Image (spheres, rainbow, N blue to C red):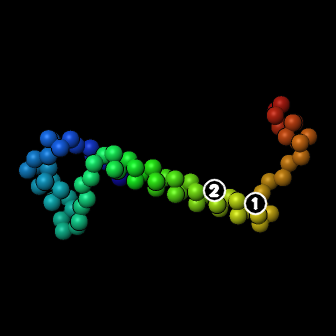
Amino acid sequence: MPHNHLKVDELDAGVIQNLKNTFHQREVVILPKDTYDEWEKARHNAAFTAELQRRITAIDEGKGIVKTMAELRVMEHE
């Protein structure tokens, strides 16, 4: 979903009417960009942590890829 960023002084009756027409009776949230950025960072960190935990679990369950040092050295020079 594309994000539109406006400065406070760009808010006018046309923007408000556009929001009403677009979202009808739905609730909307308007917040400062720095707050939005913090939330996005936290959301991405949570997704990264979940993916990391999924990978650790896979390794614990023996689903990892095992290579010897000799195999890794050969791969390094390919």
Can you give x and y, in whole percent of width and height, for residue 38 in the image?
40, 49
Can you give x and y, in whole percent of width and height, for residue 1 in the image?
35, 52
Locate residue 28 relative to residue 54 in the image: left or right: left
Res 70 visible:
yes
- Dot 2, crowdedness within 10 Å: few (<14), some or many (≥20)? few
Residue type at the position of mark 2: Leu
Q: Residue at x 70, y 64 (%)?
A: 57
Q: Residue at x 34, y 50 (%)?
A: 35
Label of residue 26 in the image: none
In the picture as drawn, the residue positioned furthest to the left comes out as: 13
Label of residue 52 in the image: 2
Spatial separation of the CA atoms under disc 1 and disc 2: 11 Å
Q: Earlier in the sequence, mark 1 or mark 2?
A: 2
Q: Which residue is mark 1?
A: 59
Can you give x and y, in whole percent of width and height, for residue 52 in the image?
63, 56
Residue type at the position of mark 1: Ile
- Dot 1, crowdedness within 10 Å: few (<14), some or many (≥20)? few
- The image quadrant that residue 24 belongs to is bottom left
Q: Residue at x 80, y 63 (%)?
A: 62
Res 2 visible:
no
- The front one of 4 and 35 is 35
Can you give x and y, in whole percent of width and height, for residue 36 in the image?
34, 50
